[in-house]
């Protein structure tokens, strides 16, 4: 690996992109490029092409996306579809046109059918209907995968795609209307403990199963793939274990030290019943995650409290 090659991390202020930036810097990459939205709006094709023409990054990590939890996805399908299509079309096309030698596109486990076999192999893509609460986002991500694979097939480009499972960790979004379940429950349980409340509301039945990967593990996997993977076959990134939402909520209560009651609000959607990725393609290459769920939640909680103290 040439550590002086330029790498553009698109989306470095997000959960995944921020962790990938830290990972690359820790590993000694000396020429990592980033741009804020104010500097280069990735939904703006002209701005993106101007940036690529000037900088000609050799490697591109496409971690920029409009993301959100089940409610945000359900309420704003137009924004999730349009914004993601624009970002990925602009960045992938510019990477191809201005000489990037490699591109890593980050998808999502929600690209797979609602009732896919568990654990979900990469081959389950497009084998059945999607989960309706996030089908717009999933369609955008599937289009991104197909664009990368098409560049590989038609033009021989080394554009690879990784499919992460549900992510969490420092830098996550804790806004209750738009966040994913883990940061939402961490915040709700913390606030209940702080205010002396006796109950915490959990959306849905508590029965759906989800797999949670610490974002630093995702970042490690991304670096591993940039350095060792060049197949157009997409590759799942997960930790290999899932829990029910009830179990997750109970674990969060333990970590936070909240002894009150969980109330399940059945008026909220459950979404996909189960989403556990088959990661055998990645583990066969020798990569393993490091962070156990309890430890990762405790570390994320410490980060959240520190941020709260700082008032940022
Ligand atoms: O993490 P989450 O919002 O998204 O919700 P998905 C996972 C499960 O947790 C659902 C339940 O069954 C929710 O009903 N849940 C319980 C909660 N309490 C809460 C809460 O307070 N907040 C939230 N947000 N959920 C997303 C997709 O699906 O996963 C995205 O919408 C993306 O497109 C992402 O793929 C990884 O796992 O259901």
Image (cartoon, rainbow, N blue to C red):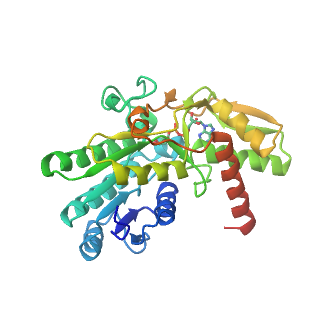
Q: Is residue 215 above or below residue 258?
A: below
Relative horizontal placement of residue 210, taking residue 159 as reference (left or right): right
Q: Is residue 199 above or below residue 6?
A: above
Residue 28 pos. (x, y %): 46, 67
Q: Nearer the viewer, residue 155 or 263?
A: 155
Q: Residue furthest left?
A: 154
Q: Is residue 105 visible to the viewer in this orientation of the structure?
A: no
Residue 244 pos. (x, y %): 61, 29
Question: Residue at image x 27%, y 51%?
Answer: 159
Q: Quadrant of the N terminus?
A: bottom left
Locate residue 260: give its quadrant: top right
Q: Nearer the viewer, residue 294 or 143?
A: 294
Number of labelled discs?
0
Residue 31 pos. (x, y %): 39, 72
Q: Quadrant of the C terminus?
A: bottom right
Residue 25 pos. (x, y %): 48, 66
Q: Is residue 113 above or below residue 179?
A: above
Ligand 1 falls in which quarter?
A: top right
Q: Residue furthest right?
A: 196
């Amino acid at each position: 690996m040439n550590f002086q090659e330029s790498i553009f991390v698109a989306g470095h202020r997000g959960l995944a992109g921020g962790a990938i930036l830290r990972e690359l810097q820790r590993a000694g990459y000396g020429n990592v490029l980033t741009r804020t939205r104010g500097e280069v709006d990735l939904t703006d094709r002209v701005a993106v092409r101007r940036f690529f023409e000037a900088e000609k990054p050799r490697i591109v990590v496409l971690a920029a996306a409009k993301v959100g939890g089940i409610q945000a996805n359900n309420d704003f399908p137009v924004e999730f579809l349009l914004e993601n299509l624009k970002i990925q079309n602009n960045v992938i096309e510019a990477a191809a046109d201005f000489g990037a030698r490699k591109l890593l596109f980050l998808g999502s486990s929600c690209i797979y059918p609602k009732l896919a076999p568990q654990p979900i192999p990469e081959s389950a893509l497009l084998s059945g209907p999607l989960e309706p609460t996030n089908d717009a986002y999933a369609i955008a991500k599937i289009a991104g995968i197909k664009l990368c694979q098409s560049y590989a097939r038609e033009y021989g480009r080394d554009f690879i795609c990784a499919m992460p499972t549900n992510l969490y960790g420092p830098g996550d979004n804790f806004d209750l209307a738009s966040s994913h379940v883990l940061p939402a429950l961490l915040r709700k349980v913390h606030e209940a403990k702080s205010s002396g409340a006796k109950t915490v509301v959990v959306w849905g039945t508590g029965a759906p199963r989800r797999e949670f990967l610490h974002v630093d593990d995702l970042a490690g996997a991304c670096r591993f793939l940039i350095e060792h993977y060049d197949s157009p076959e997409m590759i799942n990134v997960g930790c290999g274990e899932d829990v029910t939402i009830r179990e997750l909520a109970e674990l969060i209560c333990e970590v936070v030290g909240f002894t009150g009651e969980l109330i399940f609000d059945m008026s909220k959607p459950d979404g996909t019943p189960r989403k556990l990725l088959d990661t055998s393609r990645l583990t066969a290459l020798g990569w393993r995650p490091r962070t156990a769920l309890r430890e990762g939640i405790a570390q994320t909680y410490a980060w959240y409290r520190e941020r709260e103290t700082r008032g940022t």
